[in-house]
Amino acid sequence: MLIRPKEGILDPQGKAVERALPALGFEGIEHVHVGRMVELEAESPEQLGELCEKLLANTLIEDYEIQTL
Amino acid sequence: MLIRPKEGILDPQGKAVERALPALGFEGIEHVHVGRMVELEAESPEQLGELCEKLLANTLIEDYEIQTL
């Protein structure tokens, strides 16, 4: 599952990375967003949406995306 | 970029999620690993490996993977 800050919500980690880039010699990098990735093995993938809602994501400020392999 | 704990390195966030699952009624979920996801727009994607090494990942304990859209 990928969990990212909602559009329009402040992303302080992304901003911190953006600010650090010039001092390290990186240029031309924009729109940095930092989120979380949770990987797991589930017998019943249909419960993963509820898992994100209840435990993994703060749905007030974060969106989640479920990818199945 | 996806940044995850290296194989064999303790993943306390993943363990914390695993331990919380039964109390929330989730069963059949195993091997939980929590990592980070960094999304950005770069003019020169070839510098992203160096960016991961220098700033985003702790390569002693984390692996990174670069995906280009």
Image (tube, coloured by chain):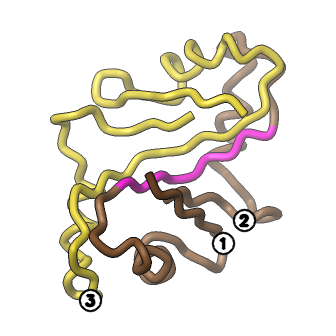
Chain colours: A brown, B yellow
**Label 2: element kind:** loop
Residue occupying the point 52% across, 17% down:
B54
Q: Which amino acid is tagged 2?
A: Lys
The answer to whether A35 appears left or right of B27 in the picture is right
Q: Which mark is residue A61?
A: 1
The answer to whether B4 appears left or right of A18 in the picture is left
Please give the range of residues in magenta. A31-39
Q: Quadrant of residue B19?
A: bottom left
Residue occupying the point 62% across, 58% down:
A4
Contact between marks 2 and 1 (CB within 8 A): the answer is yes
Q: Quadrant of residue A18?
A: top right
Quadrant that contains the C terminus of chain B: top right
CA gap between label 2 and label 1 equals 6 Å
Magenta-span inclusion, residue B43: no
Magenta-colored segment: predominant secondary structure: strand
In this figure, which residue is indicated by the disc labeled 3? B25
Tag 2: Cα neighbours inside 10 Å, few (<14), some, or many (≥20)?
A: some
Tag 3, which chain? B
Mark closest to the chain's N terminus, 2 or 1 = 2
Tag 1: Cα neighbours inside 10 Å, few (<14), some, or many (≥20)?
A: some
In this figure, which residue is indicated by the disc labeled 2? A6
x and y percentages locating residue B64 in the rendered image:
45, 28
Tag 2, which chain? A
Residue occupying the point 60% across, 77% down:
A59
**Label 3: element kind:** loop
Residue occupying the point 43% across, 78% down:
A46
Q: Which amino acid is tagged 3?
A: Gly
